[in-house]
Image: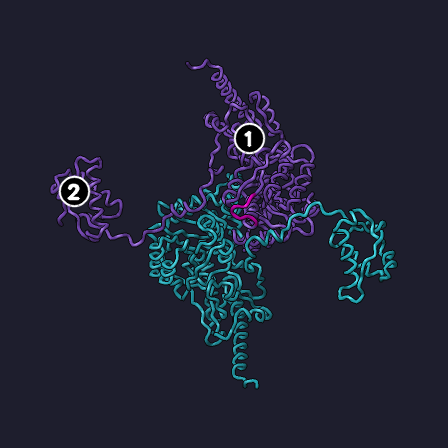
Chain colours: A cyan, B purple
Amino acid sequence: MDFVPQLATDSEVPLYRQLYAQIAGKIRSGEWPPGQRLPATRELAGQLGLNRGTVAAAYEALESEGLIAGQVGRGSFVARPAASPGVQWTALLDRAEPPLPAAVHGLAGSGISFMTSRPSSGLFPLDDFRSAAEAVLARADLADILQLGSPSGYEPLRRYLLKKARSEGVAGQADDLIVTNGCQQALDLIGRVLLRAGDAVAVEDPIYPGLKSLLAGMGVRLCGIAVGADGVDPAQAARIFERERQRLLIVTPNFQNPTGATLPLAGRRALLDAAGRAGVPVIENDPYGDLRYSGEPLAPLKQLDEHGGTVLLRSFSKISFPGLRVGWALGPKPLIDRLRHAKESADLHTDQLSQAVLLEFAESGRLEAHRARVLKAGAERLAATLEGCRRWFPEGTRWTKPEGGMNVWVRLPDLLDAGELLARARREGVTYLPGRYFAVVRAEGGALRLSFAGLEPEEIRRGLEILGGIFKGELRRSANLDTAPAMV
Amino acid sequence: MDFVPQLATDSEVPLYRQLYAQIAGKIRSGEWPPGQRLPATRELAGQLGLNRGTVAAAYEALESEGLIAGQVGRGSFVARPAASPGVQWTALLDRAEPPLPAAVHGLAGSGISFMTSRPSSGLFPLDDFRSAAEAVLARADLADILQLGSPSGYEPLRRYLLKKARSEGVAGQADDLIVTNGCQQALDLIGRVLLRAGDAVAVEDPIYPGLKSLLAGMGVRLCGIAVGADGVDPAQAARIFERERQRLLIVTPNFQNPTGATLPLAGRRALLDAAGRAGVPVIENDPYGDLRYSGEPLAPLKQLDEHGGTVLLRSFSKISFPGLRVGWALGPKPLIDRLRHAKESADLHTDQLSQAVLLEFAESGRLEAHRARVLKAGAERLAATLEGCRRWFPEGTRWTKPEGGMNVWVRLPDLLDAGELLARARREGVTYLPGRYFAVVRAEGGALRLSFAGLEPEEIRRGLEILGGIFKGELRRSANLDTAPAMV
């Protein structure tokens, strides 16, 4: 092999890189065919008057690009070009929708975590759960539960839920019910059936990240309706409906996530009227309705709606065991028919073991007994949260006063940014979710969600004392900066 | 009220309808305002010289349209226009994708049913299942199983599956694994991440209805690769890849549904080569691979693929309990990351109780013990099916000879239409799924799928004897028609 590379010792390009480039050129042009042996590094280094390490570095770069291959004891050879370019996953995935904002599940809550809107594991009635599960295991029809089931849901559970909804006046004769993997899947199936990329969907602002991610993934445009102390403003909803046709309105009338706000009866009626006049279907997302700690329950939109335009979503997740993914959608038959088709495509049907166990848990009265304990604990935790906000948070802080659910929404004084302060809070052992994860249009830098249901009252008090200290300290610091003499 | 309608007694339009139309016109124009009282039927009938029943019929039609309302004892009044037109579900749902072809789950299999590709409930090891479930119920970390989990799956199960795949040489360091609600959800999530409406996707032809429906719902175009005795033809796949960019190739190399065909090793290599050269990701759908009754297992595509372009889907459904919806996808990390996001949007995570029970069932060795029994029974059932085809089906019938799985594909002699003959078979107590449910491009009128795994050998023999009698009888009848003297 006659190989005399042109190497410039005064170049900014390192010698090994120059050597690499010239050999790569010969291989790529085909001048050096696959299988041709390369000079040994010692030999080439001697020939060219180079350090042997320089040649070795060039060979390494060639090898890492797959241009040459070393064979132990035999030296290096020009490699055969890969037969297959293979699949370019990065390019394929880039073409798909851009990655969603960091999912909340990815955010580890450590220490005293106000991060996740979920029930307390400590309150799980494990013995009652075991009894319900054992009753199912002892059943004569256990094999049917383990066999392939129906996309509509485990029929005994479906019938139970529908009968209950009818007896409560929530379901009419024109309604049907499908079991889903929690409210999240019900929302997903509704989106698959009713939404296309580019559609406009009216949602509450702020809204929980799981729903924001889901809708973003579908490529729909979100129109946010501001949530106040009394939930969404029906007049704003009506204006939005007039301005542009909305494909759906998704609303959480009870203890909304993240604000905890509840829509009063007059607001429910006005919202239904606005949606009905505009012909917009209402998706009533109600995972928290059964978690009212004080005050009187309000009729669901589904019950108030005389025009059959509302679909009610409920779930066992918040009142019992979220690890068992069982919820349901109740609505007009033609829609539920289509959801059944979508469900069959999505995953055939919801897990039947959990459906059977939850049915047993509910029918045996264990669910109601558990709910009574959860309501008592929830009331204490909510009270501890509201008391902690009053006691520890700086003047000028505002927070919602829900009568149930799992979340309180806090707005810090203007100078404070809840997102920036999270890192400090985490260092002191307390975490929460800052407002930006919930923003549709209106990003509130000072806002944060306190999910209190998973914490003991004592943890809540300690956590809020720590947060209050951080917030007050930062406020003093900002005030000092503001009043510091101008730098001249 | 001065109301003198113009009624034509010689018109084809009934008098009540003419009266209805004229009153409706006055109401819609606003000439008769809401609340105005209508004449009593007797009074108006007398005025106009009409039969009272005619007037009552007109009022009834007005009332059914909501234009008037009757008040008991007070007569009829012009109704207030409905404040809300309400939601037009039919129109909203029409705008969505057209309803899919009748889902297979909707087709009731009665009597001896060869309709569903699912395991036999009779073989479920209920005591072993109870033991596994009870072991989970007794665990100290039961509360963690019942709490909200990770979109990746129940971590102990995910680790177990990944470790097993690594020890079998199926998973490499660049791979990751996500637990899904069976293979169906894995396919759905892959579609959500990688497919857009209008994309081309290469699939086997024939293919099972669940996959066809799923892809149809996504609005993708299917390119069918014919399945022969040795599975898909890699040369045809290569031609399809050259003709048009395919976004995915979805293939079931072991005991394909519906044909039962298995792709031999050379075919697997050739297919991977064709897909790799074209840069097309391969989705290896492998729910049946563990159900080989004879012959040697073949390396999965995932293992043979040196370029990381393959995603392997497996499931507990076919080898244990399909009512527990647990499967998984194994593939390159960047893809699995995106599937995790999609999974979180779809339903947060797979049910954890079933994941924990199936892990216990597998780790304790119960799954392998069950599989041994299932393989023995499957071999007998497959043998009974092949023997029954030989013994009872008319000359000229062809069928596949799988070495495992749950399905045999039958092609009847040309004159017979399996779809038309199903009604007769059903009357005689036997059902199967005709070929048209599986066709991508090539509809084979004479084809049908025999799903044998759920039936006892004796049922299989009896069922095939009945089917053979029907097919032979129809063949004789057609032959007689063919040889009958011409009608002159």
Label 1, residues with CA under 10 Å away: few <14, some 14-19, many ≥20 = many
Judged left or right of residue A234, residue B143 is: right
Mark number, residue A249: none
Side (left or right) of A461 relative to B48: right
Closest to the observer, A81 or A216 = A81
Circle 1 — which element?
strand
Quadrant position of residue B230: top right
Q: Circles 1 and 2: CB distance less than 8 Å? A: no
Residue at image point 54% right, 70% down: A462
Give the chain letter at badge 2: B
Q: Residue at x 35, y 62 (%)?
A: A235
Q: Main secondary structure of the magenta part?
A: loop
**Cα distance in 3D space between marks 1 and 2:** 68 Å
Q: Which residue is mark 1?
A: B450
User: Is residue B196 highlighted in magenta?
Assistant: yes
Q: Is residue A289 among what the camera can see?
A: no
Locate the C terminus of chain B and report the quarter of the image it occupies.
top left
Give coordinates of residue B132: x percent, y percent.
60, 45
Give A466 or B215, whichever is nearer the viewer: B215
Q: Is residue B112 above or below residue B332?
A: above
Q: Is residue B56 left or right of residue A184?
A: left
Question: Which numbered disc, 1 or 2, marks the residue that appears first in the sequence?
Answer: 2
Could you tell me which chain the residue with mark 1 belongs to? B
Judging by the rendered image, the residue that carries numbered circle 2 is: B6
- Label 2 Cα crowd, 10 Å radius (few <14 / some 14-19 / many 20+): few
User: Residue at (40%, 48%) from the top-left corner?
Assistant: B92
Residue B199, magenta (yes or no): yes
- Residue type, label 2: Gln
Percent position of residue B319, x then y: 60, 39
The three-letter amino acid code for the residue at tag 1 is Leu
- Which element type, helix, strand or loop, lies under badge 2? loop
Highlighted magenta segment, given as a residue range: B194-200
